[in-house]
Image: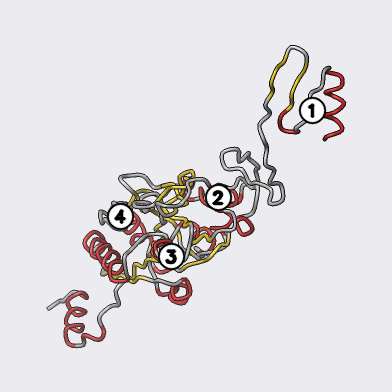
Amino acid sequence: MKYSFSFFLAAILSLFPGLALAANIIAIYAPNLDFKDGGERNAYVNKIAKELSAQTGMQWEGQSFARAGDFEASKSSIDAVILDADYFSSKGGTFRPVAMLSSNGQTTRPLKLIATKSGSDKLYNYRGKRLAVVANLSLASSFVTASALGHEAKATEYFSVEEVRDVRSAINALEVGKADLALVFDGYDSGFKTVYTSSPVALPIIAINSSKLTSEQAEKLKNALQNISVHAASFVTGSAAYSAADASAYRRIASTKRTTSLSYQPIEPETADISITSLKFSERNDGIIFDPFQIRYIPTIAEFDKKLEQSL
């Protein structure tokens, strides 16, 4: 009697459960997405793993990471990953981008500088104040320098930049008075005052580890990752195809060497604080009175000019 290999494999695995094939890993490290806690982040990636298992016929399980160091230490065991776009563009390594998270089909979203409701809505009033940014890489400060300050000043010199673990920490710092501004995605500004809104930048990128998958598995996984329907982090509604132009927006803005006028948010010199008194003229038929300088009555314009020059 002939038996298929799969029959023998199933029989062996039933006798020795410890020999069961290890599940593929889908991971997430996206600290710019606001998950209320680790449990909510775990639930999100596990729902995605369940969808992938159903669509690919492969066994998937989710892993979430709160720190870059922990993710880096586990990279070699990961088959697919969801990464913040700025982090992926710098440390994506061998991962191949195949999809992006989306918000109602859009793979980009503006970033905002937000303050408390009682704060000013003028950026120039925050010189020397504390700005909380996610401690992914140095790109956050470069992004603020280029986008919000137009290279008129460096973010690290204009603000007191404080790095935090994730966007939830940035929002909490603002709420308890440990920061004056926070850099967050549009959508996380409810209850706050918007001080600045950037051009749209990429939502997190979904990439695969091609070295761990056959070409057939990689193609099947790519199609599945472009059709995720799991909602999370306030505005994430699923996924869409990868766009290189969208993915590079954050880094492109951060590295653009341009200078723009900050006429709408002037950076005022620290030493030039001059109080100007309005000029008040009083006409008479036979002369002029110049009130601010308390000049005596002068009968002619020539003498008025001479006296004014001496006073200045």
Q: Is residue 115 in sight in this rendering? A: yes
Q: Which residue is mark 3?
A: 173
Real-space Cα separation, disc 4 to disc 3, in angstroms: 19 Å
Q: Could you tell me the amino acid type at mark 2?
A: Asn
N-term mark: 4 or 1: 4
Q: Earlier in the sequence, mark 3 or mark 1?
A: 3
Q: Position of residue 264 (x, y in %)?
A: 56, 39
Q: Is residue 128 above or below residue 212?
A: above
The residue to which callout 4 is attached is 234
**Marks 4 and 2, how far apart at CA:** 30 Å
Where is mark 1, residue-wise? 296
Residue at 78% x, 30% y is 295
Q: Nearer the viewer, mark 2 or mark 3?
A: 2
Mark 2–mark 1 Cα distance, whole angstroms, equals: 42 Å
At mark 1, the secondary structure is loop
Where is residue 149 shown, x and y percent of the image? 59, 47
Asked whether 158 or 32 is in front, the reply is 158
Provide the secondary structure element on which disc 4 rests.
loop
Closer to the eye: label 4 or 1: 1
* Residue 125's disc number: 2
Q: Residues within 10 Å of mark 1 (few under 14, many from 20)?
A: few
Say which label, 4 or 2, has the lower sequence index.
Answer: 2
Residue 24: x %, y % from top left: 32, 71
Q: Nearer the viewer, residue 286 or 84?
A: 286
- Identify the amino acid type marked 4: Ser
